[in-house]
Every structure is written in structure tokens, then in C-alpha cells.
Image (tube, rainbow, N blue to C red):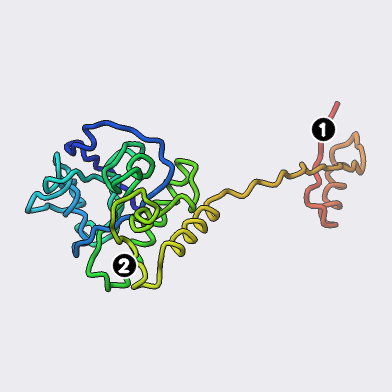
């Protein structure tokens, strides 16, 4: 995951300062053919590029609407894919409508024309990795992840179709997404170390000599026989 942070401090949602205890994650997509993060995030931090229209979401009410999410996934100006955190994860967002705002972290995937498999694969992978990261942060599992469309069916979000208008075009759905998050969580679970039993060594003394030359002669014979760890220890 390529995670960056640019908090929307000018958005009224951030200024409201309400916090939540995250109980789930809601996946959104933007519904517009513009995969560039600079469309939604500003001002330019050197990686995003300049939004010449200034219509990003780091303003009081973007387009006059009460909207704000916790993160966006999309393209940087160099074409690489990144995630930008735009609200503290435990802040109440304005993303789902209904009670989902009180319980869920919400992030948007920037849509393109919906037909580019390379772009979809890259942002899908980034979204899976973001969810793995958030699940670990807040003790969640893949079962706590839904999309906006599913939230509507559950009666906790407004009537939107994302992301089920896009994912199936590339052979994916929320069940495959949750399965991929589950696999990511399993892969990142450290395997407990197996305790090792300290090795024991037994030393064999082959002789004691009052004349050092005799000891040296014996040492050479022992090493010649293949016992390369042999040594002379002097004691009074």
C-alpha cells in the first residue's frame, strides 16, 4: 500500500470534530470518469499535481454538499497508484448517509472509464491492502466490510450502486473482495516461533602434558585425524 496523508482541515466535516468507534469499513467509488487524486485532494503536495479548477474536497462544502470521506485511492501525477488519508480514521465522516456514518470508515476509489483492467487491478489491490491495514488497526475482519450498495440494502446508507456497477466488469464483487482481505489478514499474521532447545556440548580430554611440546604433538595428530575443533587449554 502506498499510503499518504492530507487531512481535509477546511471541510466542515472535519471542523465538526465528531468521533466514532469504527465498527466497519464502507467501500465507495466516485461515479465520475476521473482517476486522478488531484481532482478530490488538495492543495498539491508535490505528488498530486495541481487541480487547476480548485474543485477538490478540502473546502467547507465541496460543490455545496456535505461530503467527506476518510480516504481516496487513485492516480498521482506520475501515474502511480496511491491512497490518501483525508480524515482521521476515527472521525465521523459524511460518506454513506444514514447510520453508516456513525459506524463505518468510508473511502472512495477514483473511477476511470470502468473498462481499463490494468487500472482496476491496481486500485483493487490498493483497496484490499487498505482494508487489511484498517482491520488490523481496529480489530475488524473481512466480515465487517461492505460497499455503499450493500449499505443501502442493509438500510444504513443512501441509495447508491457503488461499487457493484464496476467490480463485476472485471470479474470481481464484494464477496471476492472480502475473500482477498481475509487472505491478506492471514498472510500478515506472524507465525509463532517454535522454541529451540539449547544445544549441549560434551568435551573429551585426550591427555594432560607437563611439557608443551608433547601437547603440541598430540594436538597435531588429533587435527590430522579430522577433529579440527581440538584445542590446548592451559591450567596450573
Mark 2 Cα-neighbour bin, 10 Å: few <14, some 14–19, many ≥20: many
Residue 191 coordinates in the image, percent (x, y): 62, 50
Residue that appears at 21% across and 40% down: 8
**Element on which disc 1 rests:** loop
Q: Is residue 233 above or below residue 71?
A: above
Relative height, residue 34 to residue 96 (above, below): below
Quarter of the image holding residue 11?
Answer: top left
Residue at 77 percent across and 43 percent down: it is: 197
Please name whichever residue, 172 or 119, is drawn nearer the observer in this view of the structure: 172
Specify whether 38 is left or right of 97: left
Residue, disc 2:
166
Q: Is residue 23 left or right of residue 192?
A: left
Residue drawn at (26%, 43%) of the image: 94
Between residue 49 and residue 221, name the one nearer to us. 49
| On-image quarter of the C terminus | top right
Closer to us: 55 or 151: 151
Across and down, in percent, residue 12 comes to: 18, 36
Q: Secondary structure at mark 2?
A: loop
Residue at image mark 1: 234
* Mark sitting earlier along the chain (2/1): 2
Task: Residue 34: give its label.
Answer: none
- Total of numbered circles in the picture? 2
Q: Residue at x 55, y 54 (%)?
A: 186
Distance between the alpha carbons at the discs numbered 2 and 1: 80 Å
Q: Quadrant of residue 122?
A: bottom left
- Position in image of residue 49 (x %, y %): 15, 53
* Tag 2–tag 1 contact (CB < 8 Å): no
Q: Residue furthest left?
A: 53
Amino acid at each position: 500500500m502506498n499510503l499518504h496523508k492530507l487531512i481535509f482541515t477546511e471541510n466542515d466535516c472535519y471542523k465538526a470534530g465528531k468521533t466514532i468507534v469504527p465498527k466497519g469499513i464502507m467501500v465507495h467509488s466516485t461515479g465520475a470518469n476521473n482517476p486522478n487524486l488531484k481532482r478530490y485532494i488538495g492543495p498539491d503536495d508535490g505528488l498530486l499535481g495541481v487541480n487547476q479548477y480548485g474543485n477538490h474536497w478540502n473546502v467547507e462544502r465541496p460543490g455545496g454538499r456535505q461530503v467527506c470521506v476518510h480516504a481516496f485511492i487513485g492516480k498521482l501525477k506520475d501515474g502511480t497508484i496511491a491512497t490518501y488519508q483525508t480524515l482521521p480514521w476515527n472521525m465521523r465522516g459524511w460518506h454513506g448517509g444514514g447510520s453508516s456514518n456513525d459506524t463505518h470508515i468510508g473511502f472512495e476509489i477514483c473511477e476511470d472509464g470502468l473498462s481499463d483492467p490494468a487500472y482496476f487491478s491496481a486500485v483493487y489491490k490498493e483497496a484490499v491492502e487498505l482494508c487489511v491495514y484498517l482491520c488490523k488497526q481496529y480489530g475488524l475482519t473481512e466480515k465487517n466490510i461492505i460497499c455503499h450498495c450493500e449499505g443501502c440494502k442493509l438500510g444504513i446508507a443512501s441509495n447508491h450502486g457503488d461499487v457493484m456497477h464496476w467490480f463485476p466488469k472485471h470479474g470481481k464483487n464484494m464477496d471476492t473482495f472480502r475473500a482477498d482481505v481475509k487472505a491478506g489478514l492471514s498472510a500478515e499474521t506472524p507465525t509463532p516461533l517454535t522454541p529451540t532447545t539449547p544445544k549441549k556440548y560434551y568435551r573429551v580430554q585426550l591427555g594432560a602434558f607437563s611439557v608443551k611440546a608433547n601437547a603440541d604433538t598430540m594436538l597435531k595428530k588429533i587435527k590430522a585425524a579430522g577433529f579440527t575443533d581440538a584445542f590446548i587449554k592451559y591450567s596450573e
